[in-house]
């Protein structure tokens, strides 16, 4: 089986960087040929500039198969056949309803990107799928906990996949950022891997033998658990799931033959990368240092506080929030990076510079290193890529090292197919 990949919502190429151990040497991309990326799509609907796609093309070259088009408008039949489908996609409202035109038809909310993934699954039937999302996906929406993930699992079930998932805090496994994301691995039941995994009971699979158990060890005993069903005996179709399904999904789990087993688990790893190791050793540009005004404003925002606020109806209430470390602790991994990094807010990192001892924000290179991209990956000579945009893109990115570890495992899996 060929190791071919289609990358949806590609961003600046985080999945590709991880799967192919990409580096940047003298401004040129050095890419191992573990995986052949046969098609990639990146489109940012909220802006005319397409900085992420421009970066992807700068680093991986121009190609008719590097597509800057709204995925909703792409004819999925033109996507090449592939072994592995990857992508990090937004957490949205996945509710579905019966079509008014055809009572047997099913339609999801327009613009929800999960349905584009679902269409690729139906049309191209890739043997393996690896997706990444924010961990709140497992408990959304608030009015019907677990429904959205249940809709996803039923979509996989209807297309003859089994699924496992794990919420991974990258820092728990020696990576340089406290970034919690759910990784979802799906595989066709007809694959050699699928047949082998089907013989393993849920407990052994989730604690010892599954992909995540092998690569991201956990303590042997679950802290909590729940079970459920998503199959046709439990729910007639996706509309039935959307209307009636709810389940408390924990941070590890499996769906096999429509049956769901999920556990609350704890990481078991002593590896650590600190923020101090990420910081540049050489002097940085003075523009990254905080002036007195910005210093005081950020310090206040990061402090604990209790504030009197008013509800829309005029009723007053006390709003409180705890303190955020100021400056950031350099002896632990970086906090989660957001798209607002370096602006005046509670989430912006403030560090003590190694060279001068003065307080400053992160540099773009440090932001890239926190996500384990090659240094200056987003530093491209294109007007779409401002320095502010570089931070924004890193706030949206995944931790490349996690994908790198998974990719090495999947390469061996496909060698056995």
Image: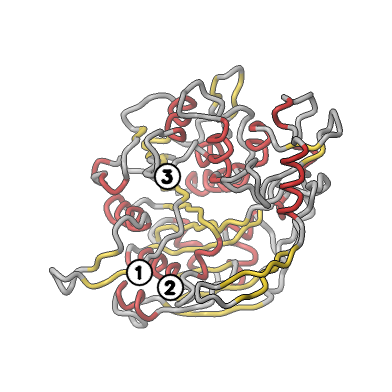
* Circle 2 residue: 147
CA–CA distance between discs 2 and 1? 8 Å
Instruction: Give the residue at x 64% y 66%.
Output: 207
Within-10-Å neighbours for mark 3: few <14, some 14–19, many 20+: many
Do the residues bearing badges 2 and 3 touch, measured as CB atoms within 8 Å?
A: no
Instruction: Using the image as rendered, state which of residue 267 and residue 383 is in the foreground.
Output: 383
Q: Quadrant of the N terminus?
A: top left
SS under mark 1? loop
Chain-order first, disc 2 or disc 3 = 3
Q: Is residue 76 left or right of residue 166?
A: left
Instruction: Give the residue at x 45% y 33%.
Output: 51
**Position of residue 317 measured from the top left corner of the image (x, y, whole percent):** 63, 75
Within-10-Å neighbours for mark 2: few <14, some 14–19, many 20+: many
**Position of residue 89 measured from the top left corner of the image (x, y, whole percent):** 44, 52
**Position of residue 19 measured from the top left corner of the image (x, y, whole percent):** 53, 39
SS under mark 2? helix
**Position of residue 228 measured from the top left corner of the image (x, y, whole percent):** 48, 80
Do the residues bearing badges 2 and 1 touch, measured as CB atoms within 8 Å?
A: yes
Within-10-Å neighbours for mark 1: few <14, some 14–19, many 20+: some
For the image, the number of numbered tags is 3
* Circle 1 residue: 95
CA–CA distance between discs 2 and 3? 23 Å
* Circle 3 residue: 9
Chain-order first, disc 2 or disc 1 = 1
């Amino acid at each position: 089986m060929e190791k071919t990949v289609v990358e949806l919502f590609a961003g600046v190429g985080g999945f590709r960087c991880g799967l192919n151990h990409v580096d940047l040497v003298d401004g040129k991309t050095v890419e191992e040929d573990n995986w052949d990326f046969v098609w990639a799509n990146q489109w940012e609907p909220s802006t005319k500039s397409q900085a992420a796609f421009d970066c992807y093309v700068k680093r991986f070259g121009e190609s008719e198969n590097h597509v800057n088009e709204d995925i909703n408008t792409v004819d999925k039949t033109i996507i090449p056949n592939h072994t592995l489908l990857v992508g990090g996609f937004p957490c949205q409202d996945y509710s579905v309803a019966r079509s008014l035109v055809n009572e047997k038809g099913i339609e999801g909310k327009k613009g929800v990107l999960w349905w584009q993934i679902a269409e690729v699954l139906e049309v191209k039937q890739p043997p393996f799928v690896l997706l990444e999302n924010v961990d709140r996906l497992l408990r959304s929406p608030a009015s019907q906990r677990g429904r959205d993930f249940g809709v996803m699992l039923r979509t996989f079930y209807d297309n003859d996949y089994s699924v496992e998932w794990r919420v991974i805090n990258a820092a728990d496994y020696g990576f340089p950022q406290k970034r919690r994301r759910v990784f979802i691995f799906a595989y066709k039941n007809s694959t050699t891997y699928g047949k082998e995994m089907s013989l393993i009971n849920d407990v052994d699979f989730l604690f010892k033998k599954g992909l995540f158990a092998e690569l991201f060890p956990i303590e042997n005993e679950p802290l909590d658990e729940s079970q459920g069903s998503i199959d046709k005996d439990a729910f007639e179709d996706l509309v039935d799931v959307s209307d009636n399904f709810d389940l408390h999904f924990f941070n590890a789990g499996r769906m096999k033959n429509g049956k769901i087993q999920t556990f609350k688990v704890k990481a078991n790893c002593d590896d650590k990368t600190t923020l101090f190791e990420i910081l540049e050793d050489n002097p940085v540009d003075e523009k990254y240092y905080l002036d007195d005004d910005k210093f005081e404003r950020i310090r206040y925002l990061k402090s604990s506080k209790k504030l009197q606020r008013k509800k829309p109806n005029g009723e007053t209430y006390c709003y409180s929030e705890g303190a955020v470390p100021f400056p950031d602790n350099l002896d632990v991994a970086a906090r989660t990076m957001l798209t607002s990094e370096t602006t005046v807010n509670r989430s912006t990192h403030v560090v003590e510079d190694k060279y001068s001892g003065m307080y400053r924000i992160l540099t773009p290179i440090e932001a890239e290193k926190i996500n384990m991209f090659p240094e200056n990956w987003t530093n491209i000579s294109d007007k779409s890529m401002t320095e502010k945009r570089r931070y924004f893109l890193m706030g949206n990115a995944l931790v490349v090292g996690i994908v790198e570890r998974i990719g090495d495992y999947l390469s061996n899996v496909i060698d056995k197919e």
